[in-house]
């Protein structure tokens, strides 16, 4: 509950900060607050969808997926901006035409992208901090073999990706098959789990760094890929201190 209230407070503060920026575009404070609301859904969508890009895909596909998300979010932001401007700030001009001219900065995609990126990144950092400060005690519930399974985070040893499915390996030796991608599991499990390979996500508290190339968890050695080698080394050096 506390985490949810802090996140709500962040978005309210983000709305007021955005409104203060918009005041410089000749909106009064009330108008700026209304216009700032157009940024929030798009920024929330960006902070939700961008981290879910599957990092197991090749670099080109990851870039394309990210570009599609950004274009979709930007399009929705512009549509909302134009709608609010037309609906609330337009007026009938001297020749009978509706005048709804938009400040040039609000038609600038770089300006819009910068605001959305700052709001989305702030939310991302805040959620990461909250996950560390207030770790969830709720069990993780997922579907496996057409049945619901609930596991505490600390009872999950590691997650292994095998082509189109993943296997969740638990402390009691049980393994559960699931269709969610490993990147979705990485986002779900949070900072107490560490990606060591495109196919492996391990519980840091249950793992040890055996060699620079392997991590041991639950009596099994898992490979550390070159891409994650320095990150893994840094995390386990902090754990051992």
Image (cartoon, grey):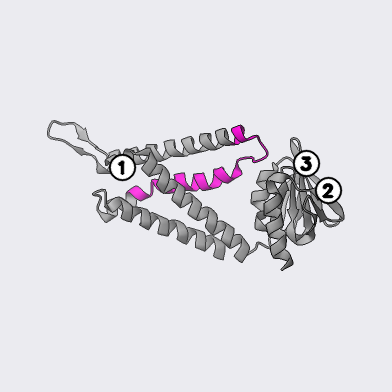
Left or right: 20 as drawn, with respect to 239: left
SS of the residue under disc 2:
strand
Q: Position of residue 152 (x, y in %)?
A: 74, 59
Residue span colored magenta: 35-62
Q: Which mark is residue 27?
A: none
Residue 64 located within the stretch drawn in magenta:
no
Q: Quadrant of the C terminus?
A: bottom right
Q: Position of residue 71 (x, y in %)?
A: 47, 35
Q: Earlier in the sequence, mark 2 or mark 3?
A: 3
Q: Residue at x 75, y 53 (%)?
A: 202
**In 3D space, how far apart are the residues under numbered discs 2 and 3 (Cα atoms)?**
14 Å
The residue that label 2 is drawn on is 175
Crowdedness of circle 1 by 10 Å Cα count: few (<14), some, many (20+)? few
Tell us which disc is closer to us: 1 or 3: 1
Crowdedness of circle 2 by 10 Å Cα count: few (<14), some, many (20+)? some
The residue that label 1 is drawn on is 105
**In 3D space, how far apart are the residues under numbered discs 1 and 3 (Cα atoms)?**
51 Å
């Amino acid at each position: 509950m506390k985490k949810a209230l802090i996140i709500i407070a962040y978005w309210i503060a983000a709305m007021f900060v955005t409104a203060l920026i918009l005041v410089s575009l000749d909106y009064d404070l009330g108008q700026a607050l209304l216009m700032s609301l157009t940024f929030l859904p798009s920024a929330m969508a960006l902070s939700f969808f961008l981290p879910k890009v599957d990092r197991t895909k090749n670099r080109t596909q990851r870039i394309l997926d990210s570009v599609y998300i950004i274009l979709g979010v930007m399009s929705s932001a512009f549509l909302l901006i134009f709608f609010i401007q037309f609906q609330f700030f337009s007026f009938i001009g001297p020749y009978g035409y509706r005048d709804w001219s938009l400040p040039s900065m609000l038609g600038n995609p770089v300006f819009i992208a910068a605001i959305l990126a700052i709001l989305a990144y702030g939310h991302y950092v805040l959620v990461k901090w909250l996950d560390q400060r207030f770790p969830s005690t709720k069990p993780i519930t997922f579907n496996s073999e057409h049945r619901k399974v609930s596991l505490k985070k600390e009872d999950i040893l590691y997650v292994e990706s095998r082509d189109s499915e993943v296997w969740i390996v638990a402390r009691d030796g049980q393994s559960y098959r699931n269709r969610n991608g490993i990147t979705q599991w990485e986002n779900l499990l949070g900072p107490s789990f560490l990606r060591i390979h495109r196919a492996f996500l391990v519980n840091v508290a249950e793992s040890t760094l055996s060699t620079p190339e392997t991590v041991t968890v639950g009596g099994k050695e898992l490979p550390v890929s070159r891409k994650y080698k320095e990150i893994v080394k840094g995390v386990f050096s902090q754990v051992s201190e």
